[in-house]
Amino acid sequence: MFLFVVFALIALAAAVGVITSRKPVYSALFLLLNFATLAALYIMVEAQFLAAVQIIVYAGAVIVLFLFVVMLIGGGELDDIGGRNKKFLARLTWPRGIALVLGLGLLVAVGYGLLSGQLMTATNDAAAFGQGSVQAIAAVLYTDYALPFELASILLLVGMIGAVALAQPPKKD
């Protein structure tokens, strides 16, 4: 339980670092740290396959893609869009207000779930631990979700081809 809390706090700190960092490269590195701590949390709940996918797909491929895009468009410091010197209420537009209300609602819901004990129920069912195994996930992925899996792979292929096409310099006539 102690390690779970430590990794959860590191994940939260990394998530805050992603949001508050002014340099996109630092944000991507904070995101990498967040993905790594989430993989550690997956291992603690005995979902080894999800931990491996978290490292291979997200920490590997997605972060490399983010860093590629950041380096392609320039990785300088972000502009101060909202104006940090302005007062908070003056910068509060309706999308930010909705996001603030939804974020506070989520915080209240999670706090209520933790305090009431609904989120801390433990199960000793052996079948629950088998659901995170490679065999259980593969059985569901390649039977019930075969078409969405293949459509997602085609979507990723189209995105990759588009990124390569956009990265090429324009041809001179």
Image (cartoon, rainbow, N blue to C red):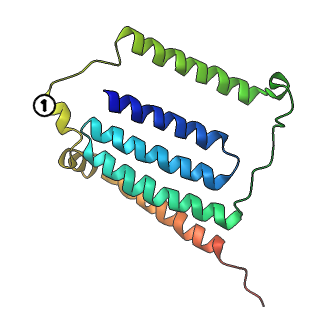
Which residue is the extreme one toward the left? 126
**Are there few (<14), some (14-19), or many (20+) residues within 10 Å of tag 1?**
few
Residue 65's image quarter?
bottom right
Quarter occupied by the C terminus: bottom right
Looking at this view, name the residue that lies furthest to the bottom. Answer: 173
Residue 126 in sight in this render: yes
Residue 165 drawn at (x, y percent):
62, 73
79 left or right, relative to 21 = right
Q: Position of residue 140 (x, y in %)?
A: 24, 45
| Location of residue 117 (image quadrant) | top left
Figure check: 137 above or below 85? below
Considering only vertical position in the picture, is 121 above or below 41? above
Report whether 13 appears left or right of 146. Answer: right
Which of the two residues, 3 or 128, is positioned nearer the viewer here?
3
Question: Where is residue 68 shown, x and y percent of the image?
Answer: 59, 65
Q: Quadrant of the N terminus?
A: top left
Name the residue: 17% across, 38% down: 130
Mark 1: amino acid: Ala
Instruction: Name the residue furthest top.
Output: 116
Q: Nearer the viewer, residue 152 or 37?
A: 37
Residue placed at 24% from the left, 41% from the top?
132
Q: What residue did someone put label 1 on? A: 126
